[in-house]
Amino acid sequence: MKKIKLGLFPKVVISIVIGALLGLVLPDVVIRIFKTFNVLFAQLLKFIVPLLVLGLVTPSIANLGRGAGKMLLSVVVIAYVSTVLASLFSYGISSTILPAYLSPGELSAEGISEKEFLPYIDLKIPPICDVMTSIVLSFVIGIGIIFTDSKGLKRGFDEFEKIVKLTIEKVIIPGLPIYIFTMICEMSARGVINVVLGTGFKVILTGVVLSIVYLVIQYCIAGLIARKNPFKLLWNILPAYLTGFSICSSSACIPVTYDCTLKNGVRKDIADFVIPLCATVHMCGSAIKLTVTSVAIAYMFGQPIGFGLFLQFALMQAIAAVAAPGVMGGVLMASIGIIGTILGFSDTMTTLVMTLYLALDGYGPAANVSGDGAIAVIIDKLFGKKQDVSALEN
């Protein structure tokens, strides 16, 4: 008989359900064992995150190259601005509507049980550098590789990227359900799980609605620029949205997004260039999902996020997310560090962000790939009749 392989989403759901149930009946000694694993895994994450950023972002910047000139710059700038605006859009809306159905401070120290479970081992694994340093270093090295044409250094970082992706796929992703299980189990034992699970559905639904609204805005802008019917463009991109929702990967959805983009009248050479590139640098859906989740968790812990602080987070998160969609959960992994360093989230808050983010992973990639089609329509209008991409790349 063939083995049944569960995806990350069902594993997370199973972890939440089992953890919530077992936390009610397990003795304190077992909860402390789970807490020990939770603490050790959190330390491992803190150690690996700067390496993830360095290993994912550096090769991505280096691989952009200088080949396509103005078009390359235009795609990257539009994608970056779109991702940042997606964060700011979802921050503004979620900060306004979430207080209507969430309670401030309900997960703060004053609002939960004073019962605490200490780990048996509290091992510290300091990272080699902080996340901000790794982001800046990635840009310095990546841009340096482009302008010096350092093939040896580029090859080294390409191989380092493979190691990083292997670490995510073989260590981090398999460990996340267990990590979430131990956290949920402890929260259940402390009597706060009902609040978390009740909130999860509201937060996820808010994120889904905001991502769809942002897509409509994107295609209205693209339709206005290209003088095309935005709703027809949206209808043609629907298969890409559904595929991205199902397989939870921007990169794996490239062939479907490409076909849908051609149906929207984009030239083949433009689609050849824009769609694969945007699958790497355009993360509007993931940004919305991460923002809504972070705003909700911060509000429930009584730590609302001010606009100035969030703007700093949005600008850096859009950079950290570059190249992350090549790996399941990559955007989340690349953003964990700045959630802690910029937003000041504790380990518990970060784990809750991860839990809600992964509880319905598909709508982020779905919005990502659908938004790629909108950028392709804009680029086709700006460059399609002026020059051939193949000529730019030669």
Image (cartoon, grey):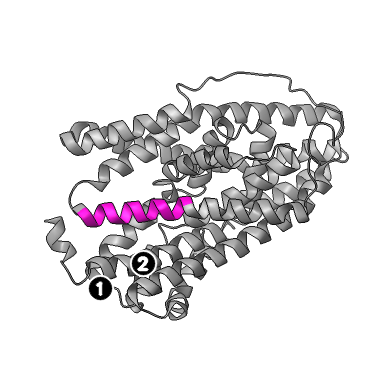
Q: Tell me if residue 124 comes above or below residue 186 in the rendering.
A: above
Quadrant position of residue 138: top left
The residue pinned by badge 1 equals: 267
Q: Position of residue 215 (x, y in %)?
A: 50, 66
Q: Which residue shows up at 14% across the image and 58% down it?
A: 392
Kind of element beneath mark 2? helix
Q: Secondary structure at mark 1?
A: loop
Separation of marks 1 and 2 at Cα, in angstroms: 15 Å
Provide the residue designation for mark 2.
255
Q: Earlier in the sequence, mark 1 or mark 2?
A: 2
What amino acid is found at the position of numbered circle 1 in the picture?
Arg
Classify 380 as above or below 11.
below
Residue 42: image location, x then y, percent = 61, 30
Tell me where residue 2 appears, x and y as whole percent.
Answer: 56, 60
The residue stretch that appears in magenta: 70-84
Give the left or right position of residue 186, taking residue 272 as reference. right
Say which of 112 and 1 sits in front.
112
**Residue 74 highlighted magenta (yes or no):** yes
Residue visible at 31% across and 78% down?
A: 265
The number of numbered discs placed on residues in the rendered structure image is 2
Horizontally, residue 182 falls left or right of residue 235, namely right
- Compared across the picture, whether 70 is left or right of 214 comes to left
Q: Nearer the viewer, mark 1 or mark 2?
A: 1
Dot 2: few (<14), some (14–19), or many (≥20) neighbours within 10 Å? few
Is residue 357 rendered magenta in the image? Answer: no
Residue 93 visible in the snapshot: yes
